[in-house]
Image (spheres, grey):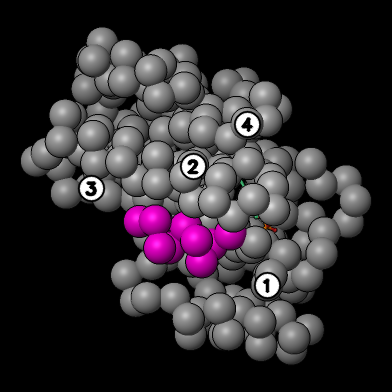
Protein backbone atom coordinates (compact mmCIF):
# COMPACT_ATOMS: atom_id res chain seq x y z
CA UNK A 1 0.00 0.00 0.00
CA UNK A 2 2.74 2.46 0.86
CA UNK A 3 4.13 1.93 -2.62
CA UNK A 4 1.00 3.67 -3.95
CA UNK A 5 1.85 6.67 -1.82
CA UNK A 6 5.49 6.54 -2.90
CA UNK A 7 4.59 6.46 -6.57
CA UNK A 8 2.01 9.19 -6.13
CA UNK A 9 4.43 11.50 -4.35
CA UNK A 10 7.10 10.85 -6.95
CA UNK A 11 4.79 11.87 -9.78
CA UNK A 12 3.44 14.88 -7.93
CA UNK A 13 6.96 16.10 -7.28
CA UNK A 14 7.68 16.21 -11.00
CA UNK A 15 4.49 18.03 -12.04
CA UNK A 16 4.50 21.80 -12.48
CA UNK A 17 2.34 23.45 -9.80
CA UNK A 18 -0.41 24.51 -12.23
CA UNK A 19 -1.00 20.96 -13.50
CA UNK A 20 -3.92 18.97 -12.06
CA UNK A 21 -3.25 15.31 -11.42
CA UNK A 22 -6.31 13.11 -11.86
CA UNK A 23 -5.48 9.80 -10.15
CA UNK A 24 -7.25 7.20 -12.26
CA UNK A 25 -8.50 4.64 -9.74
CA UNK A 26 -10.75 2.56 -12.03
CA UNK A 27 -10.91 -1.13 -11.04
CA UNK A 28 -8.89 -0.45 -7.89
CA UNK A 29 -10.53 -0.95 -4.50
CA UNK A 30 -11.53 1.74 -2.01
CA UNK A 31 -8.70 1.03 0.42
CA UNK A 32 -6.15 1.87 -2.26
CA UNK A 33 -7.97 5.10 -3.03
CA UNK A 34 -7.98 5.90 0.67
CA UNK A 35 -4.24 5.55 0.94
CA UNK A 36 -3.74 8.01 -1.92
CA UNK A 37 -6.33 10.28 -0.30
CA UNK A 38 -4.45 10.06 2.98
CA UNK A 39 -1.37 11.31 1.16
CA UNK A 40 -3.22 14.42 0.00
CA UNK A 41 -4.67 13.32 -3.34
CA UNK A 42 -8.31 14.29 -3.65
CA UNK A 43 -8.98 14.23 -7.41
CA UNK A 44 -9.79 10.76 -8.75
CA UNK A 45 -10.90 9.53 -12.18
CA UNK A 46 -13.29 6.67 -12.94
CA UNK A 47 -14.74 5.35 -16.18
CA UNK A 48 -17.67 3.13 -15.19
CA UNK A 49 -20.83 4.71 -13.82
CA UNK A 50 -21.80 1.96 -11.35
CA UNK A 51 -18.29 1.66 -9.99
CA UNK A 52 -18.01 5.40 -9.52
CA UNK A 53 -21.39 5.54 -7.79
CA UNK A 54 -20.37 2.81 -5.33
CA UNK A 55 -17.05 4.44 -4.55
CA UNK A 56 -18.68 7.83 -4.09
CA UNK A 57 -21.03 6.31 -1.53
CA UNK A 58 -18.25 4.58 0.43
CA UNK A 59 -15.53 7.20 0.40
CA UNK A 60 -15.02 10.67 1.92
CA UNK A 61 -17.36 13.26 0.49
CA UNK A 62 -14.68 15.85 -0.23
CA UNK A 63 -13.14 13.68 -2.95
CA UNK A 64 -13.50 15.28 -6.39
CA UNK A 65 -14.65 12.60 -8.80
CA UNK A 66 -13.89 13.07 -12.49
CA UNK A 67 -15.72 10.89 -14.98
CA UNK A 68 -13.33 10.01 -17.82
CA UNK A 69 -15.01 7.13 -19.68
CA UNK A 70 -17.60 6.86 -22.40
CA UNK A 71 -20.89 8.07 -20.89
CA UNK A 72 -24.28 6.82 -22.00
CA UNK A 73 -27.08 9.33 -21.76
CA UNK A 74 -29.32 7.10 -19.68
CA UNK A 75 -26.64 6.83 -16.98
CA UNK A 76 -25.94 10.53 -16.47
CA UNK A 77 -28.54 10.65 -13.72
CA UNK A 78 -26.50 8.38 -11.45
CA UNK A 79 -23.50 10.69 -11.30
CA UNK A 80 -25.12 14.10 -11.78
CA UNK A 81 -25.63 14.73 -8.04
CA UNK A 82 -21.94 14.66 -7.18
CA UNK A 83 -19.54 14.41 -10.14
CA UNK A 84 -16.94 17.23 -10.23
CA UNK A 85 -16.07 17.07 -13.91
CA UNK A 86 -17.04 15.04 -16.98
CA UNK A 87 -14.12 14.71 -19.43
CA UNK A 88 -15.92 12.73 -22.09
CA UNK A 89 -18.62 14.86 -23.67
CA UNK A 90 -18.83 13.65 -27.26
CA UNK A 91 -22.21 14.91 -28.48
CA UNK A 92 -24.62 17.79 -28.03
CA UNK A 93 -27.27 15.29 -26.93
CA UNK A 94 -25.07 14.12 -24.08
CA UNK A 95 -24.31 17.70 -23.05
CA UNK A 96 -28.05 18.44 -23.02
CA UNK A 97 -28.76 15.43 -20.82
CA UNK A 98 -26.00 16.43 -18.38
CA UNK A 99 -27.58 19.89 -18.27
CA UNK A 100 -31.04 18.44 -17.64
CA UNK A 101 -29.86 16.18 -14.81
CA UNK A 102 -27.65 18.85 -13.23
CA UNK A 103 -30.64 21.21 -13.15
CA UNK A 104 -32.49 18.77 -10.89
CA UNK A 105 -29.78 19.19 -8.28
CA UNK A 106 -29.31 22.88 -8.90
CA UNK A 107 -25.74 22.21 -10.00
CA UNK A 108 -23.49 23.45 -12.81
CA UNK A 109 -21.33 20.55 -13.97
CA UNK A 110 -17.92 21.36 -15.48
CA UNK A 111 -17.49 19.47 -18.77
CA UNK A 112 -14.71 18.85 -21.26
CA UNK A 113 -15.24 18.15 -24.95
CA UNK A 114 -13.55 14.90 -25.90
CA UNK A 115 -11.72 15.20 -29.20
CA UNK A 116 -10.83 12.13 -31.23
CA UNK A 117 -7.24 12.40 -32.46
CA UNK A 118 -6.00 8.80 -32.18
CA UNK A 119 -5.81 6.36 -35.05
CA UNK A 120 -7.88 3.70 -33.28
CA UNK A 121 -11.51 3.72 -34.39
CA UNK A 122 -12.46 2.36 -30.97
CA UNK A 123 -11.75 5.58 -29.19
CA UNK A 124 -14.61 7.98 -28.63
CA UNK A 125 -14.94 11.70 -29.12
CA UNK A 126 -15.93 14.44 -31.52
CA UNK A 127 -13.91 14.88 -34.66
CA UNK A 128 -12.52 18.43 -34.58
CA UNK A 129 -14.88 19.35 -37.43
CA UNK A 130 -17.93 18.05 -35.57
CA UNK A 131 -16.88 19.84 -32.42
CA UNK A 132 -16.38 23.19 -34.15
CA UNK A 133 -19.72 22.73 -35.89
CA UNK A 134 -21.46 22.02 -32.57
CA UNK A 135 -19.96 25.15 -31.02
CA UNK A 136 -20.89 27.29 -34.04
CA UNK A 137 -24.46 26.06 -33.89
CA UNK A 138 -24.70 27.67 -30.46
CA UNK A 139 -27.28 25.64 -28.50
CA UNK A 140 -24.66 24.98 -25.80
CA UNK A 141 -24.74 28.65 -24.84
CA UNK A 142 -28.29 28.26 -23.57
CA UNK A 143 -27.48 25.38 -21.22
CA UNK A 144 -27.24 26.91 -17.76
CA UNK A 145 -26.28 23.79 -15.82
CA UNK A 146 -23.16 22.75 -17.70
CA UNK A 147 -19.97 24.69 -18.12
CA UNK A 148 -17.53 23.98 -20.94
CA UNK A 149 -14.09 24.09 -19.32
CA UNK A 150 -11.80 22.77 -22.05
CA UNK A 151 -10.96 19.69 -24.08
CA UNK A 152 -9.80 16.13 -23.45
CA UNK A 153 -8.01 13.72 -25.76
CA UNK A 154 -6.16 10.43 -25.91
CA UNK A 155 -3.21 9.70 -28.16
CA UNK A 156 -2.85 6.53 -30.19
CA UNK A 157 -1.55 3.58 -28.19
CA UNK A 158 1.82 3.29 -29.93
CA UNK A 159 5.55 3.27 -29.23
CA UNK A 160 5.96 5.95 -31.86
CA UNK A 161 6.73 8.90 -29.62
CA UNK A 162 6.66 11.35 -32.51
CA UNK A 163 3.14 10.34 -33.45
CA UNK A 164 1.98 10.77 -29.85
CA UNK A 165 3.64 14.18 -29.79
CA UNK A 166 1.95 15.22 -33.03
CA UNK A 167 -1.45 14.21 -31.69
CA UNK A 168 -0.95 16.16 -28.47
CA UNK A 169 0.32 19.13 -30.44
CA UNK A 170 -2.81 18.98 -32.53
CA UNK A 171 -4.90 19.13 -29.32
CA UNK A 172 -2.89 22.09 -28.08
CA UNK A 173 -3.44 24.03 -31.30
CA UNK A 174 -7.08 23.07 -31.47
CA UNK A 175 -7.63 24.19 -27.87
CA UNK A 176 -6.10 27.58 -28.74
CA UNK A 177 -8.30 27.83 -31.81
CA UNK A 178 -11.46 27.19 -29.78
CA UNK A 179 -10.32 29.54 -27.06
CA UNK A 180 -9.92 32.35 -29.57
CA UNK A 181 -13.10 31.63 -31.50
CA UNK A 182 -15.55 30.90 -28.69
CA UNK A 183 -14.09 31.41 -25.22
CA UNK A 184 -11.93 34.50 -25.43
CA UNK A 185 -13.61 36.12 -22.42
CA UNK A 186 -14.21 32.94 -20.48
CA UNK A 187 -11.44 32.27 -17.98
CA UNK A 188 -13.06 28.93 -17.08
CA UNK A 189 -12.29 27.47 -20.51
CA UNK A 190 -8.76 26.51 -19.52
CA UNK A 191 -8.52 22.72 -19.06
CA UNK A 192 -6.26 20.78 -21.40
CA UNK A 193 -6.73 17.16 -20.36
CA UNK A 194 -4.22 14.97 -22.15
CA UNK A 195 -1.55 12.56 -20.96
CA UNK A 196 -1.74 9.17 -19.18
CA UNK A 197 0.82 6.94 -17.44
CA UNK A 198 2.92 6.25 -20.52
CA UNK A 199 2.75 9.62 -22.22
CA UNK A 200 2.07 12.35 -19.66
CA UNK A 201 5.57 13.79 -19.92
CA UNK A 202 5.12 14.29 -23.66
CA UNK A 203 1.66 15.71 -22.95
CA UNK A 204 3.08 18.26 -20.51
CA UNK A 205 5.57 19.45 -23.07
CA UNK A 206 2.65 19.85 -25.51
CA UNK A 207 0.46 22.10 -23.42
CA UNK A 208 -1.43 19.74 -21.11
CA UNK A 209 -2.40 21.10 -17.70
CA UNK A 210 -4.43 18.08 -16.55
CA UNK A 211 -2.99 14.56 -16.64
CA UNK A 212 -4.95 11.36 -16.00
CA UNK A 213 -2.57 8.84 -14.48
CA UNK A 214 -3.68 5.38 -13.37
CA UNK A 215 -1.33 2.42 -13.53
CA UNK A 216 1.75 4.46 -12.74
CA UNK A 217 0.19 5.22 -9.36
CA UNK A 218 -1.97 2.19 -8.58
CA UNK A 219 -0.05 -0.49 -10.45
CA UNK A 220 -1.42 -2.69 -13.24
CA UNK A 221 -5.18 -3.12 -13.52
CA UNK A 222 -6.95 -6.48 -13.61
CA UNK A 223 -7.49 -7.72 -17.16
CA UNK A 224 -11.05 -6.53 -17.59
CA UNK A 225 -9.66 -3.10 -18.44
CA UNK A 226 -10.51 -1.90 -21.92
C1 LIG B 1 -7.65 4.28 -17.93
C2 LIG B 1 -7.60 5.68 -18.42
C3 LIG B 1 -6.54 6.53 -18.08
C4 LIG B 1 -5.34 6.09 -17.25
O1 LIG B 1 -4.58 5.13 -17.91
P1 LIG B 1 -3.14 4.69 -17.36
O2 LIG B 1 -2.45 4.22 -18.59
O3 LIG B 1 -3.40 3.60 -16.39
O4 LIG B 1 -2.51 5.87 -16.75
C5 LIG B 1 -6.59 7.83 -18.53
N1 LIG B 1 -7.61 8.29 -19.28
C6 LIG B 1 -8.65 7.50 -19.63
C7 LIG B 1 -9.74 8.08 -20.49
C8 LIG B 1 -8.68 6.17 -19.22
O5 LIG B 1 -9.71 5.40 -19.59
Q: Position of residue 196 (x, y in %)?
A: 59, 57
Mark 3 surroundings within 10 Å by alpha-carbon count, few (fewer than 14), some (14 through 19), many (20 or more): few
Discs 3, 2 touching: Cβ within 8 Å: no
Disc 2 target residue: 167
- Compare marks 3 and 1 and give the one earlier in the sequence: 3
The answer to whether the beta carbon of the residue marked 4 is less than 8 Å from any atom of ligand 1 is no
Task: Single out the mark in the foreground, 4 or 1.
Answer: 4
> 75 above or below 39?
above
On screen, residue 146 versus residue 217, left or right, reads: left
Instruction: Residue lying at the far right in this picture: please name it.
Output: 223
Disc 1 target residue: 217
Disc 4 target residue: 119
Disc 3 target residue: 188
Discs 2, 4 touching: Cβ within 8 Å: no
Task: Single out the mark in the foreground, 3 or 2.
Answer: 2
- Compare marks 3 and 4 and give the one earlier in the sequence: 4
User: Does residue 81 appear in the picture of this structure?
Assistant: no
Give 79 or 125, whichever is nearer the viewer.
125
Q: Which residues are magenta?
A: 199-208
Tell me the element at label 1: helix
Query: Residue at the spot x=64%, y=63% of the render?
Result: 197
Discs 4, 1 touching: Cβ within 8 Å: no
Instruction: Residue lying at the far left in this picture: please name it.
Output: 185
Query: Residue at the spot x=69%, y=47% of the render?
Result: 158
The answer to whether the beta carbon of the residue marked 1 is less than 8 Å from any atom of ligand 1 is yes
Tell me the quarter of the image containing the C terminus. Answer: top right
On screen, residue 147 versus residue 126, left or right, reads: left
- Compare marks 2 and 4 and give the one earlier in the sequence: 4
User: What secondary structure do most residues of the magenta stretch adopt?
Assistant: helix
> Label for residue 199?
none
Amino acid sequence: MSSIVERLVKIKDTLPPDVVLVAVSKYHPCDEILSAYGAGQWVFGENIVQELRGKYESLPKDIEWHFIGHLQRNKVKYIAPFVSMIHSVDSLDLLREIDRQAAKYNRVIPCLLQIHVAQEETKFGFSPEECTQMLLEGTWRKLGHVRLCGIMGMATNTDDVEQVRREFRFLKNYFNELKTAFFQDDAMFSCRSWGMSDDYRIALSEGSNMVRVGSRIFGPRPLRQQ
